[in-house]
Amino acid sequence: MHEYASSGRDAAKVHFLLGLIGVGLSVLVGPWLAYRLNASTVYVIGPSAATFYAVLLWLHDRWLWRLGIGGCRFSCIPDLRGSWGGLLKSSVDLEHQYTISVQIFQTWSRIKVIGRTNGSCSTSVAAAVEPSQSATPGLTYVYRNDPGTFTPSKQSAHNGAAYLKVEGGGRRLGGFYFTDRTPKQTKGEIRLEFVSRLFMDHDEVVSKLTAASNPNGDDEL
């Protein structure tokens, strides 16, 4: 995973708060250990404030940022982790829609976006995640696309960028993308639905979406 930018991270306040909690814990834990160990004649040195701060920062980066109390989350950064799937429309062929799956790996400070179609795989190299109250809410990322081994030769490796707005209470992503493909640059639209917090392969995601949108199995996605 790589780091990502976000105006909703409010890193200065988070680091200050975790540091303050770390100092408080270090002041309290030393005497508590001395009491528990009956060390009336021995000076007990508890964990330092820096140790508590490091542990709290690790916990916040992995888990605490996406939790909350009473419906109020500790962070306003959208939690986009998991598998997404939907449809992609490309300027290469405006009459056809392609199925696409996207896996998003995310912590408070790092992210990785992997997009797959039947013909290629793209991996993010830089990204920004903005909260819903910002001027540009959603996920913006730059990616590197590598066509599959059995992809037609007209498709070549290329770079691209995408912007996906968070919609539907965090259950949908929709937006556009463009590439630097040669000899002709391409662009298009992407519409994604949240599938699962689990990370599934492309076929599993498409199968889940097909079953959800067509319970009778009458039509394709």
Image (cartoon, helix red, strand yellow):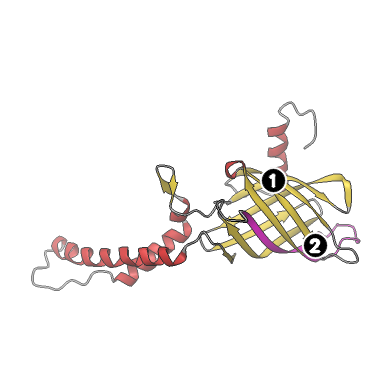
Which residue occupies the extreme top position in the image? Answer: 216
Magenta region: 138-159
| Image spot of residue 168 (x, y percent) | 61, 41
Q: How many numbered callouts?
A: 2
Q: Is residue 198 left or right of residue 116?
A: left
Extreme residue toward the left, this view:
41
Q: SS of the residue at dot 1?
A: strand
**Coordinates of residue 36 in the picture (x, y in percent):** 16, 60
Which residue occupies the foreground of this view, 195 or 91? Answer: 91
Callout 2 crowding tier (Cα within 10 Å): few <14, some 14–19, many ≥20: some
The residue at 18%/71% (across/down) is 44
Q: Secondary structure at mark 2?
A: strand
Residue 115 in picture, x, y percent from top left: 71, 55
Question: Which quadrant of the figure has residue 120?
Answer: bottom right
Going 74% across and 53% down the picture, which residue do you hit? 176
Judged from this view, the residue extending furthest toward the front is 135
Q: Residue at x 46, y 55 (%)?
A: 65
Q: Is residue 21 above or below residue 117?
A: below
Q: Is residue 115 left or right of residue 105?
A: right
Task: Specify the amino acid type for callout 2.
Answer: Thr
Q: Which residue is mark 2?
A: 179
Q: Residue at x 72, y 42 (%)?
A: 206
Residue topped by disc 1: 192
Q: Tell me the quarter of the image containing the N terminus.
A: bottom right
- Say whether disc 1 or disc 2 marks the residue closer to the N-terminus: 2
Q: Position of residue 37 (x, y in %)?
A: 15, 63
Mark 1 packing: few (<14 Cα in 10 Å), some, or many (20+)?
Answer: many
The foreground one among 66 and 120 is 66
In the image, is residue 86 above or below residue 215?
below
Q: Is residue 76 magenta?
A: no
